[in-house]
Amino acid sequence: MGEPVVRAAVAQAMRIMGEQFVLGRSIEAAIARAAKDNLLCSFDMLGEGARTEADAANYETAYAKAITAIGKIGRAQKTLTASP
């Protein structure tokens, strides 16, 4: 096989794996896809990749945003399932 064929095969494999493990580019997109596909999942923002203080601050902000978004979903579900 030539290099272009191998590169194409690797790119396709990465797309397939990405669709299995990455639900969205934002927490809102991930929550929407999880709801659409009826998935129960956990989220990881990959903050361990921070290399600088600025990176760490950006990840902290992203985590806070994700916690808020997931909390809103949890409150909505609790309200829907609460008995009178």
Image (cartoon, helix red, strand yellow):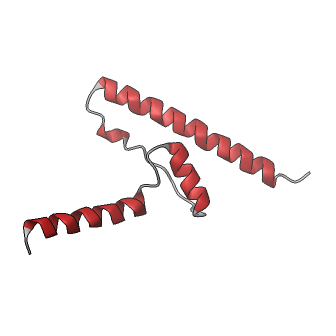
Is residue 20 placed above or below 56 in the rendered structure?
below
Q: Is residue 39 above or below residue 59?
A: below
Q: Is residue 39 above or below residue 46?
A: below
Q: Position of residue 69 (x, y in %)?
A: 59, 40
Q: Position of residue 46 (x, y in %)?
A: 37, 44
- Residue placed farthest to the bottom in the image? 1
Between residue 15 and residue 56, name the one nearer to us: 15
- Say left or right for 15 vs 33: left
Residue 42 versus residue 10: which sits nearer the camera?
10
Above or below, 21 relative to 29: below
Specify whether 3 is left or right of 40. Answer: left
- Residue at the image point whose x is 27% and y is 27% from the top: 52
Q: Quadrant of residue 75?
A: top right
Q: Quadrant of the N terminus?
A: bottom left
Extreme-right residue of the structure: 84
Residue nearest the observer in this picture, 82 or 17 = 17
> Relative to residue 49, is residue 41 drawn left or right?
right
**Residue appearing at x 33%, y 40% in the figure:** 48
x%, y% of residue 49? 30, 40
Q: Quadrant of residue 57?
A: top left
Q: Residue at x 42, y 43 (%)?
A: 45
Q: Position of residue 80 (x, y in %)?
A: 79, 52
